[in-house]
Image: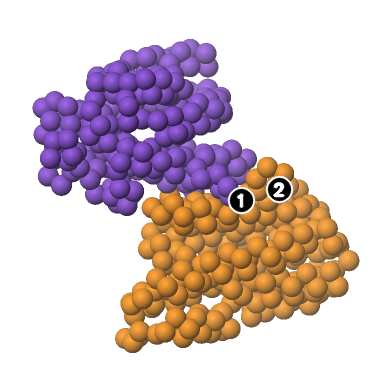
Chain colours: A orange, B purple
Amino acid sequence: MSELLSPEDLEKRLREIGATRYHNLHPFHALLHGGKLNRGQVQAWALNRYCYQTAIPRKDAALMSRLTDRQLRREWLQRILDHDGCGDDPGGIERWLVLTDGLGLDRAYVMSMEGALPATRFAVEAYVRFVYERTNLEAIASSLTELFAPSIHRERIAGMLENYGFISNDVMAYFRKRLTQAPRDVEFALSYVKREANTPERQQAVLDALRFKCNVLWTQLDALHFAYVEPGLVPPGAFVPDDVR
Amino acid sequence: MSELLSPEDLEKRLREIGATRYHNLHPFHALLHGGKLNRGQVQAWALNRYCYQTAIPRKDAALMSRLTDRQLRREWLQRILDHDGCGDDPGGIERWLVLTDGLGLDRAYVMSMEGALPATRFAVEAYVRFVYERTNLEAIASSLTELFAPSIHRERIAGMLENYGFISNDVMAYFRKRLTQAPRDVEFALSYVKREANTPERQQAVLDALRFKCNVLWTQLDALHFAYVEPGLVPPGAFVPDDVR
């Protein structure tokens, strides 16, 4: 890419990446939302996804440790508050554990991440490293998958409540909360990226960062699908659902 | 050191480090609090110290990016809130800028850190790197200079208000606020260190971390003293007070 895009065209290109690469397009998601998974497969999804959830504040702190602009740090801090909680708000990670509790998983086992797929851990840590090592602009751009999150969350709340007897309304609190949090966060990040990506090289870096992040999410579903759907080869040491024990 | 100290003896050793190495013992501090500096020298101190203040939330975020324990992150987050502020609280860095404003320094110049001594910047960045690279225990132990901070702050508030016509009560807000914040923070860090430093090697690492941090603070005053007191050789590019221009 050699020409400078207008901010609007850059946003269009970013949204195209979401339309072709976001993990709502993964077959595992169709199975999850469509009620095609059994309880053990949903458990596997939830306990693997915990690894991602719990790494998010570390990723956000990694960015903050590099931000010399106090206003930007103050803005970004809200994400850590959302996930880790503060004062009376237990935060998003706790809400995720309410979901894994509701699925009948032992909380200590989930938090130990012992049963998670190695591929999940690798993908998640690749994301944290990316934020450490790349420019602040790329780190911020990598958060832009939140542009595509609210629709997947809405779909998930409806689909999972409708299709699974073992999913109650209470345990979906995480997703309901993200419906309001994600749009607020992404509005800031998108304006930042559109303003700061002011050379063709920086625009390319921003698009690549979003592709990278889509890969982080997609890879996690590939690993789940491989281990728990088809061919269903659970790697040594990873969670084995009761259904198939 | 080969024997394991009791937690109480470890605390005693930590406090001994403060009693012999904390920067309240530096001659520059005696001059500062005793009213022996002119306005330009106090300006030099405040603008250099800004570099330290503004790096603290980055240092704390660097630690948080490595903490996998959510409760620990929630605890540590308070420090970032204290320094960067949140909501209506402008935070400690802003309060520091009120001090530099009150000293007649241009805020943009202070924030640019252009006039800061290179030695200040090196010491501050060494602290941030230390927190990135050492164990979480060492990183937390390096914060324990806060054990010794309240007494220096009290001394500073009294001494500076009494001795300098150009220091008003308002501009000392930073130090007054730290009188309550630092003890709360350090109580947590000290218990953590006493509990987690449970081998002779870890105890040695903790003592070394506190010595390191004392060096970070002391070196900054050495550089100020050298440049602005005696021999008074301001390095190329560093702040030159009006008094001596």
Q: Which residue is label 2 attached to?
A: A89
Q: Identify the amino acid type marked 1.
A: Leu
Hey, which quadrant is residue B123 in on the image?
top left
Q: Which residue is label 1 attached to?
A: A81
Of residue B2 and residue B215, the one placed in the foreground of this image is: B215
Task: Find numbered disc 2 in the image and state the secondary structure of the residue it sits on.
Answer: loop
Residue at 40% of width from left, 30% of height from top? Answer: B168
Mark 2, residues whose alpha carbon is within 10 Å: few (<14), some, or many (≥20)? few
Q: Is residue A192 above or below residue B24?
A: below
In the displayed structure image, the side of residue A136 where residue B196 appears, left or right: right
Of residue A194 and residue A13, the one placed in the foreground of this image is: A194
Whether pointer 2 and pointer 1 mark residues with C-beta atoms closer than 8 Å, the reply is yes
Q: Position of residue B1 (x, y in %)?
A: 37, 16
Q: Chain of mark 1?
A: A
In the displayed structure image, the side of residue A31 where residue B243 appears, left or right: left
Q: Position of residue A201 (x, y in %)?
A: 33, 77
Task: Find numbered disc 1 in the image and state the secondary structure of the residue it sits on.
Answer: helix
Q: Are marks 2 and 1 on the same chain?
A: yes
Residue at 38% of width from left, 24% of height from top? Answer: B161
Q: Position of residue B163 (x, y in %)?
A: 32, 21
